[in-house]
Image (cartoon, grey):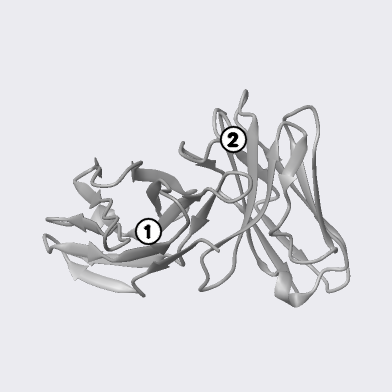
């Protein structure tokens, strides 16, 4: 079945550091890919998405490129801030059966000032 | 209150008791999803509703779990004879349609602790 594998956390960085959180997937067909973020005390919210190969999703300084050849959707940000501390989830839209999102296990990111 | 609303936010129960978790989706959203988030685990899909029907129940872990949706709106997830392994955060999400190429809007979850 469809699955998502994320870089294991937790990840701790200093402010202004470069961030990469790896995500790879296994799926039939060509799913859409997503990054969701869960800030402390809040519900999950969509950060960015890409719906086809080579698309780049971007939001709030974060970027991720849909790489079909490597089945990856790595999340990057050039200069992180303390306010980026959160749990990040990579997800794909399953094309098997009814439409639903399949999530990775999440990566907890902590940014120190 | 434009967002997805879940209640209770916290529930502590004894093993063997039944619990009901409620989800009030965003008005007009036809699709509704239940997920479970266990400690150290990702989000585990439980069930998906399109309107009042559930085309995909494949994630329900056992027959102790059931869910219904009425009026194309509020949904209730029921866990009978709770076990300690049912302890988790239960998340509800809704979307304007059933196409998962779109965005899901999540509630803040119901944290269930089974003693």
Which picture quadrant has residue B79?
A: bottom right
Mark toward the viewer: 2 or 1:
2
Q: Residue at x 54, y 36 (%)?
A: B99
Q: Residue at x 55, y 72 (%)?
A: B39
Do the residues at pointers 2 and 1 share their chain?
A: no
Q: Is residue B44 visible?
A: yes
Q: Residue furthest top?
A: B28
Q: Residue at x 85, y 64 (%)?
A: B64
Q: Is residue A81 visible?
A: no
* Residue A95 screen position, x and y as percent: 53, 48
Q: For this view, does B19 lie left or right of residue B34? A: right
Evaluate if marks 2 and 1 touch, with contact meaning CB atoms under 8 Å apart.
no
Label 2 secondary element: loop
> Who is closer to the viewer here, B67 or B2?
B67
* Depicted A81 relative to depicted B32: above or below: below
Q: For this view, does A107 lie left or right of residue A110? A: right
* Residue B51 screen position, x and y as percent: 72, 31
Numbered label attached to residue B98: 2
Numbered label attached to residue A66: none
* Quadrant housing the C terminus of chain B: bottom right
Label 1 secondary element: strand
Q: Residue at x 48, y 59 (%)?
A: A103
* Quadrant housing the N terminus of chain B: top right
Numbered label attached to residue A88: 1
Which picture quadrant has residue B78?
A: bottom right
């Amino acid at each position: 079945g469809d699955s998502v594998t994320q870089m294991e956390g937790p990840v701790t960085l200093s402010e202004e550091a470069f961030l990469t959180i790896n995500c790879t997937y296994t799926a039939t067909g060509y799913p859409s890919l997503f990054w969701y973020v869960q800030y402390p005390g809040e519900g999950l919210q969509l950060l960015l998405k890409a719906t086809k190969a080579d698309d780049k999703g971007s939001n709030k300084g974060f970027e991720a490129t849909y790489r079909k050849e490597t089945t990856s959707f790595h999340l990057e940000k050039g200069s992180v801030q303390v306010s980026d501390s959160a749990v990040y989830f990579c997800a794909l839209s399953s094309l098997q059966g009814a439409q639903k999102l399949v999530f990775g296990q999440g990566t907890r990111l902590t940014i120190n000032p | 209150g434009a967002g997805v609303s879940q209640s209770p936010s916290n529930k502590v129960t004894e093993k063997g008791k039944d619990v009901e978790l409620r989800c009030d989706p965003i008005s007009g959203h036809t699709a509704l999803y239940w997920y479970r988030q266990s400690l150290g685990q990702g989000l585990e899909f439980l069930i998906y509703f399109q309107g009042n029907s559930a085309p995909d129940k494949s994630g329900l872990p056992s027959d102790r779990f059931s869910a219904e949706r009425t009026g194309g709106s509020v949904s209730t997830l029921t866990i009978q004879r709770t076990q300690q392994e049912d302890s988790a955060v239960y998340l509800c999400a809704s979307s304007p349609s059933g196409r998962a190429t779109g965005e899901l809007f999540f509630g803040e979850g119901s944290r269930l602790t089974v003693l």
